[in-house]
Image: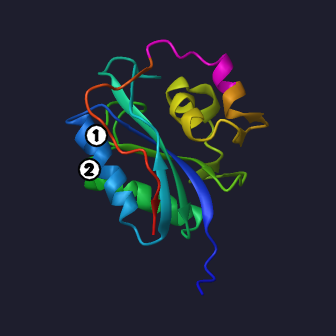
Amino acid sequence: MDSTAFATAFLGLGSNMGDRVAILQGAVARLQAVPEIRTMRTSRFYRTRPWGDTDQGDFLNACAEISTSLPPLGLLDLCHLLEKEFGRTRGRRWGPRTLDIDILDYDQQVRSDEPLILPHPLAHLRGFVLVPLAELAPDLTIRGKRVRDWLAAADTNGIEPWKGTANDNQARNM
């Protein structure tokens, strides 16, 4: 019997460069192939306007719920590795990117030290995170409020489900 402890984590994924659909689908496939990730569910893809630095193209965003045996910093390392594999270069803050993967929540842990702040310090303020996250976990508590409550107060103007292609939203059990 496997005695490895698994944590539930929520990831935010986004892309606004290249073939955004293929990049997000590829990132989801790569995450599903990681042995330390036991199950995974993904939200639909959403077309969203850029946030922060608005002088760039629209994003496709999604969220994923995973069950993982990776510790928080190990999961962060994996996210950075996948971003690099998909051509991410770090330049201007909130600038265009081929792939962005943020850890939004890791087993409801709270930590305020770099390089990983949990829950994600801006997740509760971003409609492009809250819309797909509410699809997966509307009752998840972030910073003292449920995702559905943060979403009710968020600016969701311009966020719409992506209709360009279908994506598999089923959980994968290993």
Q: Is residue 141 above or below residue 109?
A: above
Q: Which residues are magenta?
A: 150-158
Q: Residue at x 57, y 15 (%)?
A: 155
Q: Residues within 10 Å of mark 1 (few under 14, many from 20)?
A: many
Residue 81 visible to an observer of this rendering? no
The quarter of the picture where residue 57 lies is top left
Q: Residue at x 68, y 29 (%)?
A: 148
| Residue at the extreme right of the image, as rendered | 144
The quarter of the picture where residue 137 lies is top right
Q: Residue at x 54, y 24 (%)?
A: 127
| Residue at the extreme bottom of the image, as rendered | 1
The quarter of the picture where residue 7 lies is bottom right
CB of mark 2 within 8 Å of CB of mark 1? yes
Where residue 140 appears, x then y in whole percent? 69, 42
- Which amino acid type is marked by label 2? Phe
Coloring basis for residues:
rainbow
Magenta run includes residue 155: yes
Q: Residues within 10 Å of mark 2 (few under 14, many from 20)?
A: some
Residue with the mark numbered 2: 86
Residue 79 visible to an observer of this rendering? yes
| Residue at the extreme top of the image, as rendered | 157
Disc 1 is placed on an element classified as loop
Measure the C-alpha gap from mark 2 to mark 1.
7 Å
Report the side of 134 relative to 97 (left or right): right
Where residue 124 appears, x then y in whole percent? 64, 31
Where residue 15 appears, x then y in whole percent? 33, 36
In this view of the protein, which residue sits in the foreground, 101 or 162?
Answer: 162
Image quarter hosting the N terminus: bottom right
- Which amino acid type is marked by label 1? Thr
Residue with the mark numbered 1: 98
Disc 2 is placed on an element classified as loop
